[in-house]
Image (cartoon, grey):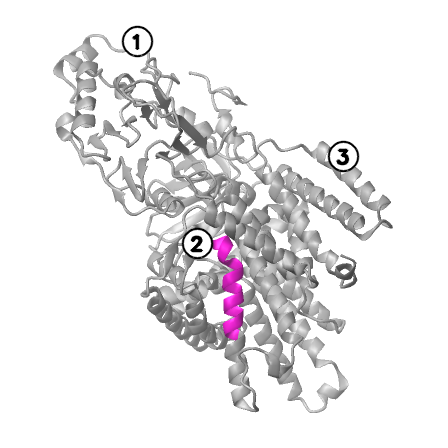
Amino acid sequence: MAEEQAYGHAFLFIPVFIGAGALTWFALAEQPGLYKLALLLCVSGMAAILLRHARTVWRLGSRLVACFVAGMLLAALETQRLDTVLLDTPVTTLVRGTVIGREATDRGHWRYIVAVTQTSDPRLKRPPDKVSLLSRSREAAIAIGRTIEGRARLSPPSGPALPGLNDFAFDSYFKGIGAVGYFYGTPHAVTAAEARVNGAAVALRGRITEEIARWREAIGTRIRTTIGGDAGAIAAALVTAEERAISRDTIDVLRQAGLAHVLAISGLNMVLAAGTFLIGARTLLCLVPGLAQRVAIKKIAATGALVMVFAYILISGGAVSAVRSWIMISIMLVAVFFDRPSISLRNVALSAIVILLVNPSAVTGPGFQMSFAATLALVAGYAHWRDRKLEERPLVIPGAGGLRFVSGFFGGLFLSSLIGGLSTMIYSAGHFHRLAAYGLAGNIMAMPVISVLVMPFALIAMMLMPLGLDRYPLLIMGQGIEWMIAMARIVAGWQGDITTGRLPESAVLLIAAGGVFLCLFRTRLAAGGLIVMTAGVVVLLVQSTSMPALVISEDGRLVAAIEGARASVNRQKPPDFIFAQWQRALDLDDHRPPVQRADLAQADTEQAEKAKADKPYADPPPILSPGVGNRRAPKPPIDVVAAKTSIRRALLESPAGRFGCAPKQWCAMTTREGWLVVAVEDARFVGAACDTADIVVTPVMLRFSTCRTGARLISGKSLRRSGALEIYASDDVTTGSGQGTTGMRIVEAVGGATRAWERHRLYDWRTGAFVPVLPAD
């Protein structure tokens, strides 16, 4: 430990423990408050000060504990500072607001980011500040800064598709987006009185933000128009980070080839742009006679590169990977001014500390984790490469001239691709549950094109765009991207996309922590990183991930019974957004659609219609509206006995392991555990399903929460609080037939809904308060 401290590597662990503290705070179901954390930080800080002259282990340990607590406090402060209002329930309303951002999709539609100023018909009691709305209209888009108005369907950001998967509500909370949805028809630009802004500084910041958004959009449109097709959409994404215009097929091909990272404005893009500018500017300055002897042209070139990367980050949208790259490259360029080493682990640590101080929530995302993992491994590998003699470097052919240069270039390309791929592999499997088996081959084939044609000519085009001379550089850039797509299609054709399924969290944490220790330590302690990684691999191989028997989406509309790699669902075409995540997480094959039993569907009888006419309902049916102010019209009663008979027939006659469905009414099946499951679409059949099944699932917001028979009732009301569900069979499984839920273990995706990005699930718009249990009406 003393030797490690002599190297100055104790500083490198500061962002590691700050990030670990932030991760811990975000993962806790019951999060400690600000005052408790502030007090704990004071205590740990005082301990670090008192132990500053103690033995090395105690001194470092006390400081790292203080960093860990500081990370938790930073996470709590960011959460409280943002205080994003998330919509509590789906609603259709008239939205008016200011367009603060827009982006074209691959189908020619527009997605607007709207700062909401007014809602009406109905007026929301707790409106979100910003919403993301899709317009399917083909008419001219509404300009940034204009006021937009239209009737829209708003929904809360969705939670995890399964427990442990990505929480989109978390992402939306920290992006400030309170709702997502789409416009009905064509939204209109309206003339509205300019809203008063509190403070000149706030008004100035708003105008600057709008102006940058206009520049960003104009640049993206110019690039897409000049190049065209997917190549133009990718070129625009490399400059402005707008990826929606890229077709899904091309994105999937790049992902299978291991080239999806090219789309993100990450260290690769930023380094190539800054390096091209630095080398080009320095070369041009060298051509001036006598200039190199009088001034430090390297520092002049570094100043220009610093300005260039600042302009790049302004138009890039501010993604975590781009900000991290900008901070690190800025530190490297500043180091040139002081004649200090540019590429070092210390610079990586500094950039991580800056991001965690400003945006600690970034540590939970794959962008931050994969970006820093790759950078950390590459910088550590570069240090090892640099410290060796040229003849001792791997993959470099001894000799002179062009042969050594070529072998060194491709050897470095091979090693950097290998190191980058290995360092991010566990994060890719942990977050996305998939691996690109031939990602190394894809990167080796495409990186020379990206390094020589794509990014350098992108920089040249951006510099010439104000003069209107960007056409030919953009065309060269587009040709390079076309070649990259062609190479990606070749690699994707090898069918190397591996679905890993959901991995044990302990294994992911051990492998990731071991990789960090391996890169940061320089003494024999680095072997500890290998030991930790080995332990993670052992856990990965030994610990088997149990499969649920039944999974239910958070809106209650999709139910799947799992048997091995097969999923039997209650919908003919399950929504791809949800089911694709289920497939990757559970390593499933394609779904088994239900058997349609139109003969079992119950039509509204003439007697029911007559009873409805003779005696209208005095009270509304036991159903709550799925949205604010939109009560469903009462429906005539059903024949409950006939409904029970139809459900029993479906359970008996449907093929084993498949749903039998009465269209638009209900679906029923018997699982391999013997559970009788009924998914109800028409709420009138809930009573019959309760009398017949063990598990009843419906998306309807029912006024009651239990079945009188003891069957498990899962409704839209309960799912709103719990999120998606996984139901496992425990050891004491009992056969169904209405005998209750003994032997079932239910895992909720959200749980108590006590955290800031989950509390909207407990909001009751009728009373305007957060309540643990929603009132009946």
In depth, the one of 653 and 230 nearer the eye is 653
Q: Pointer 3 and pointer 2: residues touching (CB < 8 Å)? A: no
Q: SS of the residue at dot 3?
A: helix
Instruction: Indicate left or right for 43 with 657 as reference.
Output: right
**Quadrant of the drawing holding the N terminus:** bottom right
In the rendered image, which quarter is residue 247 located in? Answer: bottom left
Amino acid type indicated by mark 3: Leu
Q: Pointer 1 and pointer 2: residues touching (CB < 8 Å)? A: no
Q: SS of the residue at dot 2?
A: strand
Above or below residue 65? Residue 367 is: below
Q: Residue 638 at what x, y percent from top left?
A: 20, 16
In depth, the one of 532 and 40 nearer the eye is 532
What's the magenta region? Answer: 413-428
**Quadrant of the drawing holding the C terminus:** top left
Q: CA distance from mark 3 to mark 2?
A: 45 Å
On the question of residue 145 being in view, the answer is no
- Residue at 66% in and 86% down: 286
In the rendered image, which quarter is residue 47 located in? Answer: top right
Label number found at residue 618: 1
In depth, the one of 534 and 348 nearer the eye is 534
- Which residue is under mark 3? 39
